[in-house]
Amino acid sequence: MPEELRGWNWGGLLLPFIWGPFNRVWLGLAVLLVFIPPMSGGLVLLIYGPAAIFVGMRGNDLAWRSRKWDSVEHFRTVQAQWTRWGMAGFGILVITLLLFLTSSGG
C-alpha cells in the first residue's frame, strides 16, 4: 500500500455496512450481524462500535488490498466520495435521533 494512503477512512467508520461490500471488505458487512435479534442496545454498541472503529482505522489498507484501483488518485477520489456519503448519512442519523428524542420526550 502506498505510504500516502495510510490513515483514517471516514466512509469505513460511518457506513461500514455499505462501504464494506462496495470495497470488497467483508468485515464492514459483518457488523450488520449485531442487529440480529435479540441483541440488546448496549451489546450492539459494544460490538458495532469497536468493529466500525477498526474499519475506520484500517479501511484504506483493507480497501487498497481488496480491489484493483486504476491509480492512487482513483483510490483517493473514490474514498473521498465515501467520506461525503458517510458524513451525510451520519448527519441524517443524528437529526433523526434528535427529532425522535424531542418528539417522544414531551
Image: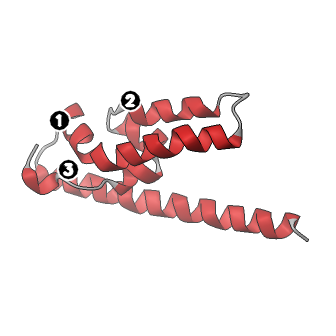
Q: Residues within 10 Å of mark 3 (few under 14, many from 20)?
A: some
Q: Nearer the viewer, mark 2 or mark 3?
A: 2
Q: Which residue is mark 2?
A: 26
Does label 1 or label 3 sit earlier along the sequence?
1
At a point 32% along the width and 32% down the height, the residue shown is 24
Q: Secondary structure at mark 1?
A: loop
Instruction: State the separation of the CA atoms marked 1 and 2.
Output: 16 Å
Does label 2 or label 3 sit earlier along the sequence?
2
Q: Which residue is mark 1?
A: 68
Q: Nearer the viewer, mark 1 or mark 2?
A: 2
Q: Is residue 39 above or below residue 86?
A: above
Residue 41: image location, x then y, percent: 69, 42
46 or 66: which is nearer to us? 46
Which quarter of the rendered picture does the N terminus lie within?
Answer: top left
Side of 16 relative to 78 (left or right): right
Which amino acid lies under the numbered mark 3 shown in the image of this protein? Phe
Does label 1 or label 2 sit earlier along the sequence?
2
Residue 8: image location, x then y, percent: 29, 55
Instruction: State the separation of the CA atoms marked 1 and 3.
Output: 9 Å
Q: Is residue 32 above or below residue 45?
A: above
Which amino acid lies under the numbered mark 1 shown in the image of this protein? Lys
At a point 38% along the width and 53% down the height, the residue shown is 11
Which amino acid lies under the numbered mark 2 shown in the image of this protein? Trp
Q: Residues within 10 Å of mark 1 (few under 14, many from 20)?
A: few
Q: Quadrant of residue 52?
A: top left
Q: Secondary structure at mark 3?
A: helix
- Mark number displayed over residue 75: 3
Side of 69 relative to 59 (left or right): left
- Mark number displayed over residue 45: none
Circles 1 and 3: CB atoms closer than 8 Å: no
Residue 101: image location, x then y, percent: 78, 65
